Image (cartoon, grey):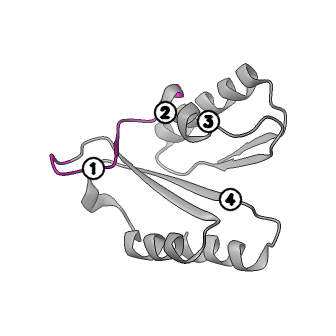
Amino acid sequence: MVRLISLALREVDTIRTTKLLFFNKQEEDILWRCQLDDLAANDERFQVEYILSEPSASWTGRKGRVDETLLNDLLLRPHGSKCYVCVCGPSAFTEQTLGYGILMIMINNNSSSVLSK
């Protein structure tokens, strides 16, 4: 995943912003964290947000599970802008997330959004 994001940022000059929403149960479940943090620090077009469903007491980042409110907050963008969303994870997570994404598109009537799994 890190290599794909890095390649896309390096080779596709039309990418304005890439935002990775990385959902995990606990902090130790976050794969490639150092590499993702380095990529975010070195390319202003890339942002990563870690969201934990079972965080430790010391976790200062976002907490929770994927839901309509969280996605709406994190994916808010100017009207008419294009958005491509990829979802990866266990089947139940993927289907639930895609369902919320489709609902958001219908509510916002934004036909320039694309969902993929």
Q: Which residue is mark 4?
A: 17
Q: Secondary structure at mark 1?
A: loop
Q: Is residue 64 above or below residue 68?
A: below
Residue type highlighted by circle 4: Thr
Q: Which residue is mark 2?
A: 70
- What span is colored magenta in the figure? 56-68
Residue type highlighted by circle 1: Thr
Q: Is residue 112 above or below residue 84?
A: above
Q: Which mark is residue 112?
A: none
Alpha carbons under labels 3 and 2: distance apart: 13 Å
Q: Return the residue nearer the eye: 87 or 90.
A: 87
Question: Which of marks 3 and 4 precedes in the sequence?
Answer: 4
* Pair 3/2: label in front: 2
Q: Position of residue 115 (x, y in %)?
A: 71, 42
Q: Return the residue nearer the eye: 74 or 87.
A: 74
Question: Which of marks 3 and 1 precedes in the sequence?
Answer: 1
Alpha carbons under labels 4 and 3: distance apart: 21 Å
Q: Position of residue 45 (x, y in %)?
A: 65, 65
Alpha carbons under labels 1 and 3: distance apart: 27 Å
Q: Which residue is mark 3?
A: 98
* Pair 1/3: label in front: 1
Q: Secondary structure at mark 4?
A: loop
Residue type highlighted by circle 2: Leu
